[in-house]
């Protein structure tokens, strides 16, 4: 899309397209996410979207200024889908553990969309809800406001960084992923202890571990560090609640 703007009053008319489709922002976002999943980043063009929707491509400008505006909506939709399946329990550490894993899983379900949008700040409804919710979890746990913001920042950046990393890996062709995994067995596991003592000593663990993502381990370490910090603030008895 180009940077074309349609006045708000002219947007979102509910007339069907020539194919009988009534365009909505939700339908456009869903279709864009499907095209990204099936065809990669090159699919995110106004022409291909219009074709997939059975609509004149210019009709999309009634909903989004350009592809970047659409990308922000996709990023916000990924957040909204995660929030819709997350059920807080009131135990801060368990809640952030569950939310982090769901954020990661949601990214892997739409790897191309995640790679393109994980680093963006949308300022949209679902992102605002997520910021409010996570800060609320931390503040209710007893973190002072400054600490709550710092831990929120680390939690979200860690989740998004791992989401982008693992989603990029998931976007590779299967043969490429398998070839990279094999490097740990065919190269690292064969290095001699005389020249690479640390790799040789841990080779079997490297072969077993490096084929899997490390986000759960990193998330656990982050939450443990946060709990230790909370213990300093509140005392060890209440830190895990």
Image (spheres, helix red, strand yellow):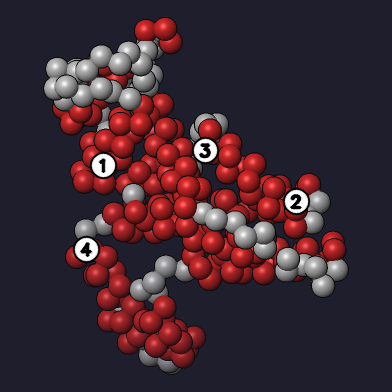
Q: How many marks?
A: 4
Q: Nearer the viewer, residue 46 or 84?
A: 84
Q: Which image quadrant for residue 65? A: top left
* Cα distance in 3D space between marks 3 and 4: 33 Å
Asked whether, in this view, residue 165 is left or right of residue 216, the answer is left
Marks 4 and 2, the one that precedes in the sequence: 2
The residue beneath circle 3 is: 126
Mark 4: which secondary structure? helix
Mark 1: which secondary structure? helix
Q: Is residue 165 visible?
A: no
* Up/down of 47 relative to 236, above or below: above
* Cα distance in 3D space between marks 1 and 2: 37 Å
Residue drawn at point x = 52 percent, y = 31 percent: 124
Marks 1 and 3, the one that precedes in the sequence: 1
Mark 3: which secondary structure? helix
Looking at the image, the residue that sits furthest to the left is 19
Mark 2: which secondary structure? helix
* Up/down of 81 relative to 50, above or below: below
Residue drawn at point x = 29 percent, y = 69 percent: 180
Asked whether, in this view, residue 179 is left or right of residue 204, the answer is left
The residue beneath circle 2 is: 139
Q: Nearer the viewer, residue 102 or 75?
A: 102
* Cα distance in 3D space between marks 1 and 4: 19 Å
Q: What percent of the width, then of the height, locates residue 94?
A: 61, 65
Marks 3 and 2, the one that precedes in the sequence: 3
* Cα distance in 3D space between marks 1 and 3: 20 Å
The residue beneath circle 4 is: 174
Q: Which mark is residue 34?
A: 1
């Amino acid at each position: 899309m180009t940077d074309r703007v349609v006045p708000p009053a002219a947007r979102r008319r509910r007339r069907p397209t020539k194919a009988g489709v009534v365009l909505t922002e939700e339908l456009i976002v869903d279709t864009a996410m499907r095209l990204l999943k099936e065809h990669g980043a090159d699919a995110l063009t106004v022409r291909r979207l219009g074709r997939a929707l059975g609509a004149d491509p210019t009709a999309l400008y009634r909903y989004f200024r350009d592809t970047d505006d659409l990308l922000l909506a996709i990023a916000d939709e990924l957040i909204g889908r995660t929030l819709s399946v997350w059920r807080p329990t009131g135990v801060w550490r368990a809640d952030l553990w569950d939310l982090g894993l769901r954020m990661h899983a949601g990214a892997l379900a739409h790897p191309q969309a995640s790679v393109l949008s994980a680093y963006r700040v949308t300022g949209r409804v679902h992102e605002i809800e997520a910021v409010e919710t996570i800060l609320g979890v931390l503040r209710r746990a007893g973190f002072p406001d400054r600490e709550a913001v710092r831990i929120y920042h680390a939690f979200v950046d860690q989740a998004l960084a791992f989401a982008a990393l693992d989603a990029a890996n998931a976007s590779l062709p299967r043969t490429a992923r398998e070839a990279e995994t094999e490097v740990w067995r065919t190269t690292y596991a064969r290095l001699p202890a005389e020249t690479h003592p640390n790799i040789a000593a841990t080779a079997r663990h490297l072969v077993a571990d490096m084929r899997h993502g490390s986000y759960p381990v990193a998330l656990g370490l982050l939450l443990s560090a946060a709990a230790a910090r909370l213990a300093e603030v509140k005392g060890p008895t209440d830190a895990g609640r």
